Image (spheres, grey):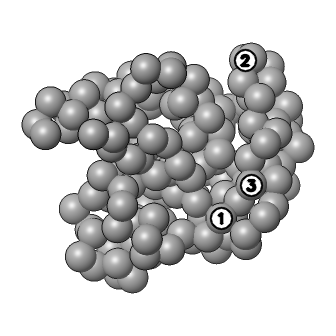
Amino acid sequence: MKKAIVFVCTGNVCRSPMAEFYLRHFLGTKTKWEVFSSGTGACFGSHASEYAVDVMKEIGIDISSHISRPLNVDLVGEADLIVVMAQHHAEFIRHRFTQYREKVFLLKSFGPDGRGDIDDPMGGSLEQYRCTRDEIMSCMHGLHDFMNKLEFKS
């Protein structure tokens, strides 16, 4: 049975799409996980930001097909794991979708230093987007280990 993970940021055009597509690439095609992203303040139908597309292309991942979507109760309810980019996203979900609060984790909690937010690069330089991408990537091994534990429990 498939499990689902949802990455959440604000607009769903920078951080969460980069995390979504990177994790899909990291997991490969023979995974039991479906990977999605959404935003707490997203509109439906926007493409990933130009710099997000550019920095992901630098590592061989094409996110140009991404279409943004707002976070909703169906997505939250179906997710086995909700991974947020910043503490305010966790607070938003825990306040708005109280019955799902135990599913919410901060992405950097899986990274080398184990705490903090992944800053929003929107409006920033290409180098800021690279830093954001690299921060996201640095958390994926820890997140993957956690996902494996969840998979093993079911």
Residue 49 horizontal side relative to residue 59, left or right: right
In this rendering, is residue 15 above or below 89? above
Q: Which disc number belongs to residue 113?
A: none
Name, please, the residue furthest toward the front: 1
Residue drawn 58% across the image and 60% down it: 38
Residue at which label 1 appears? 69
Circles 3, 1 touching at the beta carbon (< 8 Å): yes
Q: CA distance from mark 2 to mark 3?
A: 20 Å
**Mark 2 neighbour density, 10 Å: few (under 14) some (14–19) many (20 or more):** few
For residue 78, what is the image quadrant?
A: bottom left
Residue 97 horizontal side relative to residue 117, left or right: left
Q: Is residue 114 visible?
A: no
Residue drawn 57% across the image and 39% down it: 19
Residue at which label 3 appears? 67
Q: Specify which label sits upstream in the sequence, 1 or 2.
A: 2
Q: How many marks?
A: 3
Q: Report the mark closest to the observer, 2 or 3.
A: 3
Residue drawn 27% across the image and 40% down it: 1
Amino acid carrying label 1: it is: Arg
Label 1, secondary structure: give it: loop
Closer to us: 34 or 60:
34
Residue at which label 2 appears? 59
Q: CA distance from mark 3 to mark 1?
A: 7 Å
**Mark 3 neighbour density, 10 Å: few (under 14) some (14–19) many (20 or more):** some
